[in-house]
Image (tube, rainbow, N blue to C red):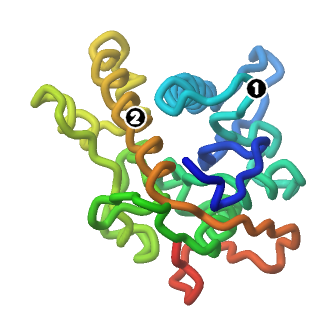
Amino acid sequence: MAEKEFWEDESAPVFFLSYARTRVRPRAVAPPRDNNEKVFQLFVDLSDHVVELLGLDPGRTAGFMDRVLDGGQLWTDDLAFAAGHCQVFIPLVSSQYLRSQWCAREWDAFTRRRVVPRPDADPSAGETPVIPVNWSVVDRRRVPEVVSRRQMFTPTRLPSNIAPMYREEGIYGLFSLGSNGKDAYDAVVWRLAQRIAHAYRTHWVEPAVTTDLRQLRDRFEEDGHDVG
């Protein structure tokens, strides 16, 4: 921004990665593992790209990903701050995500905030700071209206086989395909980072921190304040 017309907290993340935490019953004979390691890898890669694309100052946080909640237990101050100050919201859409009360709360906390264009910005038609990502294959008939009316992220200007792979497999599937999906994964994540940077440059989402869970919807429902 040439002029700080919109005051921005430099401790706020640029984007918020919202995902359904995987919960697996521990087995006495199994070693502990992070069941969300694929999500974390995506978060790291996106963060690196966004830092590069936006030229963020050293120490500025590119993204926020909650690694404390185990399926939803506490609405922490850090989570509330990130959901109330980040400029771009990235929901990783899956069947599990759409059933999660905590993911619905994260969605609600962001989308209740007011969005305005930045000065001299040229946002593309239909673009908003909410960028749903195809994490794993979902029956589109079961996607709630409040989610389906958002423009699902679709990578463009890529080799002709990559976008169909992303649509059919999701990012989780690209991970699972191993070396066969690696090039597609890298290309899709780079395009997603570019989309985040574009949303950051063209929209301003006014800060609004919600600390009381009772104020947040725990289901993906239509709502008069869904303007993000």
Q: Quadrant of residue 67?
A: top right
Q: Nearer the viewer, residue 41 or 207?
A: 207
Q: Amino acid at mark 1?
A: Gly
Measured in 3D between alpha carbons, the distance from the residue under mark 2 to the one under mark 1, in whole angstroms, is 28 Å
Residue at the (37%, 14%) spot, across then down: 178
Q: Is residue 31 above or below residue 227?
A: above
Which mark identifies residue 59? 1
Where residue 54 sits in the image (x, y, percent)? Answer: 52, 33
Reading the image, the residue beneath label 2 is 171
Q: Is residue 49 above or below residue 202?
A: above
Q: Quadrant of residue 72?
A: bottom right
Q: Nearer the viewer, residue 134 or 81?
A: 81
Answer whether residue 38 is visible to the viewer in this image: no
Answer whether residue 159 is visible to the viewer in this image: yes
How crowded pointer 2 is (Cα within 10 Å; few <14, some 14-19, many 20+) is rated as: many
Residue at the (56%, 86%) spot, across then down: 223
Where residue 13 sits in the image (x, y, percent)? Answer: 69, 43
Q: Amino acid at mark 2?
A: Ile
Which mark identifies residue 104? none
Q: Nearer the viewer, residue 68 or 87?
A: 87
Residue farthest to the left, as pictured: 160
Where residue 183 sits in the image (x, y, percent)? Answer: 29, 16
